[in-house]
Amino acid sequence: MSTECPSCRKELSQPRPAHCPYCGWRFEPKAGAPVLTKPAPRPKLPVDLVLAVDIDRTGSSSRFQEGIDRSLEQILPALEHKVASVKGFLWSHGDLDEGQQPVLLTDGAGAGQMLADAKTIVYDGGGDPPEHHCDAVENLLQNVPWAAQTRAGRGAIIGFMTAYSKPARSGRSAREIGEKVARKGILFYLICEPTPTLAELCEAAGGLMFRISNDPEPEQMQAIAAQVGASIVASVTAGSTVPLSVSEGG
């Protein structure tokens, strides 16, 4: 039996969760009975967010398929709840050496469509790791219609990546690609198996890294959405585009 959140009207998979993972409405017990306590309404951030999500669809990611879906189910609706609008672009990337080109699955739609499209990804194929993660990020930089980074507009990348990384075909290093992300003012987040290359990419982009899991903790996934929102608040206030700093895997 599922529960409908009385705040955002989302259907929840648990019959009586501690709180709504989408809007934060808390189900607080009182005198032995569940009592709904709605937090004071918070206005959405006056920011239009261009969000690019990229997923490594090779066989190396297949063991995390369930976790990737769960992560997106926690992150995307929560993020959409925080900002004025989300224009989403969902990509998957494969092994270029095996002819697996990047695929655009969601072209400028919202969280619901991105979630539906993510479930159509087939995790299979490719040669042996490493993977073309750096090429995938360069593809996003070149092909996502990024909005101007103003106080009313922001761009963000969330990447799901596993295994080690091959050198980019452009010849640019992971650091050079990350620095390009930073120059564009795009907020950058990786949910991945930490490797030296991905760490270099993330550091150069001024981004944050979280460890990928097949059974992600809801609190951690909500923290990612919260970090994106908090980073937008901080960057809009200060005029910068640097995500708030947290420890790796936090």
Image (cartoon, rainbow, N blue to C red):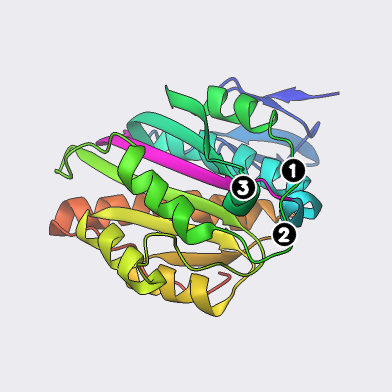
Residue bounds of the magenta highlight: 43-58
Within 10 Å of the Cα at label 3, are there few (<14), some (14-19), or many (20+) other Cα atoms? many
Between disc 2 and disc 3, whose residue precedes? 3
Within 10 Å of the Cα at label 2, are there few (<14), some (14-19), or many (20+) other Cα atoms? some
What is the three-letter code of the residue carrying label 3? Answer: Gly
Q: Which quadrant, please, contains the N terminus?
A: top right
The residue beneath circle 3 is 94
Mark 2 or mark 1, which is nearer to you?
1
Q: Nearer the viewer, residue 139 or 202?
A: 139
The residue beneath circle 1 is 123
Q: Residue 249 in the image: x percent, y percent?
A: 58, 70
Between disc 2 and disc 1, whose residue precedes? 1
The residue beneath circle 2 is 213
In the shown orientation, is residue 161 left or right of residue 184? right
Q: What element carries label 3?
A: loop
Measure the C-alpha gap from mark 2 to mark 1. Answer: 16 Å
